[in-house]
Amino acid sequence: MSEVTKILQAIQSDTGQYRSRDLLPLVYSELHRLASVKLHREAPGNSLHTTDLVHEAYLRLVGDEQLSFDGRAHFFAAAAEAMRRILIDRARKRHAQKRGGNLIQIELHPDGVSSNGQPAVEDLMALNDSLSRLENLEKTKAELVKLRFFAGLNMPEIAAMMDISLATAERRWRFCRAWLKRDMER
């Protein structure tokens, strides 16, 4: 059992031995790496900094001290989801007036970016909508997409985090890419 998992369990059991502030030093560098990968893929001119994204995501995860994570993998999956929601919310606010007819079709590549190297805000919102539909049908496959596209993890990391084989992770990624592409084309 990892140190992160031990602390998460201790916080949940409310023994008083650990608090959420004890968790941050253990997960900070990994959260920072995930945020850095995600922000690197954002369009130039983004005013959100890596540290800001890490802190905002962490506060969303542990803000009320009511942690409920099954372990390290669940915590980082939740962190990836929090980062995704933060970036989507910011994109929607920045481009509220641009929603509608000028959406651009994107191709999902294994590295999680569009063919021009930068996902457009409209593309990101369309992907988010499709991902929400996928999550209603296939929750674990949607989780894989979040870890790959929004958290920037590679397939071996995802396989380990989801406790599945690399072959299964890659097969699910191929399915998700095809499903999302078809859904976004509608």
Image (cartoon, rainbow, N blue to C red):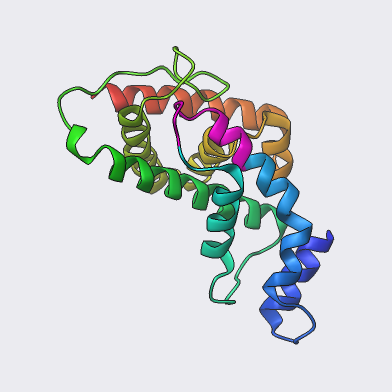
Residue furthest left as drawn: 101
Q: Say left or right for 86 vs 17.
A: left
Q: Residue furthest top?
A: 116
Residue 75 in percent (x, y) is at 64, 57
Q: Which residue corresponds to the image point at 44% horizontal and 18% vertical from the top-left?
A: 114
Is residue 115 in view from this perspective? yes
Residue 18 lies in magenta, yes or no? no
Give the position of the C terminus as an image quadrant.
top left
Q: Residue at x 33, y 22 (%)?
A: 182
Q: In which quarter of the image is residue 173?
A: top right
Q: In this view, does 95 lie above or below 79?
A: above
- Decide whether residue 38 is among the magenta residues: yes
- Across and down, in percent, residue 142 comes to 48, 41
The image quadrant of residue 43 is: top left
Give the magenta-colored segment's residue range.
35-46
Residue 69: % across, % down: 63, 65
Q: Quadrant of the N terminus?
A: bottom right
Q: Residue lying farthest bottom?
A: 15
Left or right: where 150 falls relative to 183: right
Q: Position of residue 52 (x, y in %)?
A: 56, 50
15 left or right, relative to 141:
right
The residue shown at (68%, 72%) is 20
**Residue 163 seen anywhere in this rendered image of the structure:** no
Given residues 23 and 10, the one toward you in this image is 23
- Total tally of numbered discs in the picture: 0
Residues 172 and 68: in front is: 68
Q: In which quarter of the image is residue 184?
A: top left
Q: In this view, does 107 lie to the left or right of 169?
A: left
